[in-house]
Amino acid sequence: MSRIWHVGFAAPDLDQAMSQLGGLFELTWRPIVTRSMTIKDEGGHPFDVDCHVTFSLGGPFAVEVWQAIPGTPLATPPTGWLHHLGYWVEDYPAERQRLNTLGFVPVLTSEPTLLLSRGPGNIRVEPCDLRRDQPYLRDLYPPGSDFFGEPVFPAHAEEPS
């Protein structure tokens, strides 16, 4: 299964982006969470980041928006906020190989996970493993998948402003 389930935006101001995107598309938001991780760019340079991110409620298609982190692969792209498309895959290792075969270059990793690849037209994609539970996003998994259900919000999450 390969199904687009979210579009990611890197915004210079998270609150402003939530307000603007929410108003435009009539979205409500999940609590903001902070993901602390070490990511690597396509040259292998590591970045320790605290990414403040949220997803829209409802679906099955979601909007992801985070506070851009200048100087890292999570910065606002030069062409605007649009950063990547995320899609579900059942066989994550096979998808990594398929992307490689299609000429998609890994541009963001957090070992051992490939987070983003870039391909034709500078399109960035995020293959999302259906076998990895993300409790915060359970309602966005395809019905019938192992983790589909009600979302579980982290206790330390911030309410949208």
Image (tube, helix red, strand yellow):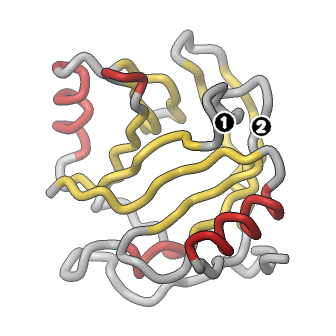
Which residue is pictured at 67% across the width and 22% down the height? 46
Taking 41 as reference, is 29 above or below it?
A: below
The residue most toward the top is: 43
Q: Residue at x 56, y 72 (%)?
A: 25
Horizontal arrangement in the rendering, residue 97 relative to residue 157 (left or right): left
Do callouts 1 and 2 mark residues in contact (Cβ within 8 Å)? yes
Q: Residue at x 53, y 50 (%)?
A: 8
Q: Which of these two is toward me, 92 or 31?
A: 31
- Give the mark nearest the N terminus, 1 or 2: 2
Residue 19 vs 101, above or below: the answer is below
Quadrant (top left, top right, bottom left, bottom right) of the C terminus: bottom right
Report the amino acid beneath label 2: Ile
Q: CA distance from mark 1 to mark 2?
A: 5 Å
Residue closest to the eye, 12 or 69:
12
Q: Is residue 12 left or right of residue 37?
A: right
Q: Which residue is mark 1?
A: 74
Say which mark, if any, is on residue 93: none
Quadrant hosting residue 96:
top left
Q: Position of residue 89 (x, y in %)?
A: 23, 52
Q: Residues within 10 Å of mark 1 (few under 14, many from 20)?
A: many
Q: Residue at x 58, y 68 (%)?
A: 55
- Amino acid on which disc 1 is placed: Leu
Q: Secondary structure at mark 1?
A: loop
Q: Which residue is mark 2?
A: 69
Q: Position of residue 115 (x, y in %)?
A: 46, 38
